[in-house]
Image: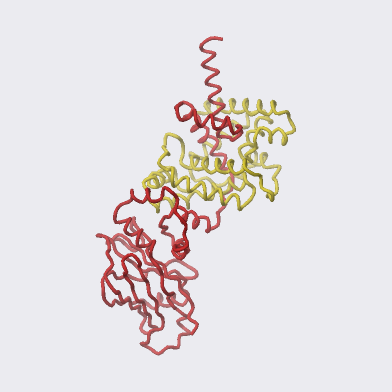
Amino acid sequence: MTGSDKNSDLRESSILDAAEYVLGTLDAETRRQVERDMATDAGLSQEVAYWQDRLGVLGLSLEPVEPPDSIWQSIARRTGINTVDAQHEHDRVVSLDQRSAREKSAPEKRSRSRVWQGLAVAASVAAVVMAALLFSNVAADRSQSGQPAYASVLYDKPTGMSWLVTASRQPHKLSVMAMGSYPLPQGKVLRLWLEPENGKVVFLGKWPDSRGEHTLKMPEAVAAKLAHAKRLMVTMEDAGTAPGAGPFKRLMWVSPVARRTG
Amino acid sequence: MADREQLTEWLTATAAGDERAFQQLYGATSSHLYAVLLRILRSPDRAQDALQDAYIRVWQKADTYSPDRGAPLTWLMSIARYRALDLLRRKRPEVAMPEEPDMIATLLEDEQSLSPLEENENQQSLDAIRHCLGTLAPQQRDSVLLAYYEGLTHQELSARMDAPLGTVKSWIRRGLLRLRECLAESSV
């Protein structure tokens, strides 16, 4: 056998090891051997990458299937990440106290994030919604005008900051009493959103970060959506950007909206 | 589906610990990975477990991705498939979804079965491999596709195709070498 033949055989062997590794037909021992060899053989490693890329497109010929929402929630829990999507965030927040140890790499990952982002994550992780906002059906509300019809408290455990939220039917407004000042990173603002049972999330106004009483007035059309509200959300976003349109948006707190029973 | 550049951007950001980018990456790709996992594992519960494990691994290992190692989506697909194969080797499901015996024929012949691919590069790659698979002998082609889509081992292929183990191994190897040659000619 010539040197050229040997090289050709080696090349063929490498191609087959890589291809069958990607295909998954190798027995366990051979598979482990290929993995060991890849650590020192750049050519083999490159060949594996080649087959991953070529055979990988076969998977794209299948009709995509949406996984259940619960999968993302589980991933978020296991990695300890702070998810932005309210659908997922709600369940993550309420299960925080029961959450088991995070995946090993999560703290390391987080340490690489920007400092202010880390602050936001820490705040969000420990955020506890102490009471549901009691938006009942506005049309059915029989409370006297001027009397608080709905109330809620949002509490941020690490800072001790809390907000008391009350709503009146007439006029259409939310009153937010901030019990302290929230340490907002420079260049960021907090914004309040309403998620209806059906339809898109609606921006309600700026969420206060300084101590004192604040009023959020709402157009009648927006107030009408309160009757069908599912949850309220507070996001942190870049100041000076349109609500929800900036490059940064982080969900901070979620308050489920429960029907008033009394 | 997001394009290659966008997926690469999200993967790079994920490697840097950007949680939002990771979530966007999941939103854009999970339906493709889940489809493959369902095909291989034939059990929604097991496919969902594998999908979770795959994205946990992506979160932990995103920094090992490099664009010169292939498209982001095929890289993700590989992670998911390897996880599925791990689960498959441990235990076959006791309750399986029904088999689809005409799956291979459908994949090769029925253009309508293809999902819409918004990324031209993926479509070209898929066209190329479909073309090259079409140049293989039927047993070679079927054994490669059964291994890919059902995660069958040599022994399982031997039983499924009712052929001696050595023959099946030979089909696979010859088929893969021919595929490599054809793909190189296609310059994909």
| Total count of labels | 0
Q: Which color mode does the image show?
A: by chain
Residue occupying the far bottom of the picture: A144
Residue at (51% x, 16% y) in the render: A7
Residue A190 drawn at (x, y percent): 32, 65
Residue at (37% x, 87% y) in the render: A147
Q: Quadrant of residue A56?
A: top right
Residue occupying the far left of the picture: A186
Residue A32 drawn at (x, y percent): 54, 32
Residue at (62% x, 44% y) in the render: B40
Residue B29 drawn at (x, y percent): 49, 48
Say if B166 sits above or below A234 in the image: above
Q: The chain shown in yellow is which?
A: B
- Shade of chain A as shown in the rendered figure: red
Residue occupying the far top of the picture: A2
Residue A61 lies left or right of residue B56; in this view the side is right
Q: Nearer the viewer, residue B152 or A204?
A: B152
Residue at (29% x, 74% y) in the render: A179
Q: Nearer the viewer, residue B176 or B163?
A: B163
Residue occupying the far right of the picture: B162
Say if A88 sits above or below B105 in the image: below
Q: Quadrant of residue B87?
A: top right
Residue A158 drawn at (x, y percent): 33, 64
Q: Quadrant of residue B100?
A: top right
